[in-house]
Image (cartoon, grey):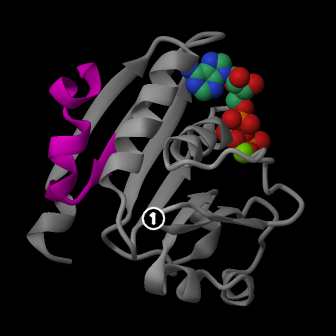
Amino acid sequence: MNADSLGFSMSVLLAGLAATEALGARIAAGLRAGDAVALKGDLGAGKTTLARAILRALGVAESVPSPTFTLVQTYETPCLVVCHYDLYRISNPREVDELGLEDALEDGVALVEWPENAGNRLPHDALTIVLTATGAESRRADVAGPARWAPFLSDAALAR
Ligand SMILES: Nc1ncnc2c1ncn2[C@@H]1O[C@H](COP(=O)(O)OP(=O)(O)OP(=O)(O)O)[C@@H](O)[C@H]1O
Ligand SMILES: [Mg+2]
């Protein structure tokens, strides 16, 4: 693990859906091929909602269903191919190999709900977001990742 992999962390209160969408747009702005975004949090915490916001900001106009049953949905955005995973039903991390995560990360982006079920298959420099419900419409997002995310996700960037 290099120093950059621990370089950025922040905790932000998302007062409502608009704030979650704004966070998604900032994440989208910083994404590049090879990036993994680990979306953690309890059932209903907002992982799919945030993934949807990222995909919308990347230009996905089609509907973005939760990959609860398909396990993975793939989107060709104008800039990047994005694979959206939901690993809730995965019981053995080896099943993740069959879902093409490695290929997805070769030249695209993976948004991964329930990354805990992937064992050590996510890159160490994944951007990790832990969502916690703090009210009906409010969430806390605890974000950590490489230092290169700071310009996209710092308080000042989110207020833009
Ligand atoms: N600020 C907010 N951010 C995200 N979701 C919110 C917010 N406020 C309310 N919600 C609602 O919370 C719900 C979050 O559901 P979502 O499917 O995104 O959760 P999830 O973490 O993906 O759950 P699962 O583990 O079942 O996949 C949605 O109904 C969404 O509208
Ligand atoms: Mg979900």
Magenta stretch in the rendered image = 143-160
* Left or right position of 22 against 111: left
Residue 55 screen position, x and y as percent: 57, 48
- Image quarter for ligand 1 equals top right
Instruction: Residue type at mark 1: give it.
Output: Cys
Residue at horizontal 67 percent and vertical 42 percent from the top: 48
The residue sitting at the left extreme is 3
Residue 34 screen position, x and y as percent: 39, 76
Query: Quarter holding the N terminus?
Result: bottom left
Q: Main secondary structure of the magenta part?
A: helix
* Left or right position of 136 against 160: right
The vertical placement of 155 against 59, above or below, is above
Name the foreground residue: 40 vs 99.
Answer: 99
Q: Secondary structure at mark 1?
A: loop
Specify the quadrant of the image occupied by residue 33: bottom left
Residue 132 screen position, x and y as percent: 53, 29
Please name the residue that numbered disc 1 is placed on.
79
Specify the quadrant of the image occupied by residue 133: top right
* Magenta-drawn stretch contains 159: yes
Query: Quarter holding the C terminus?
Result: top left
Residue at horizontal 25 percent and vertical 36 percent from the top: 10
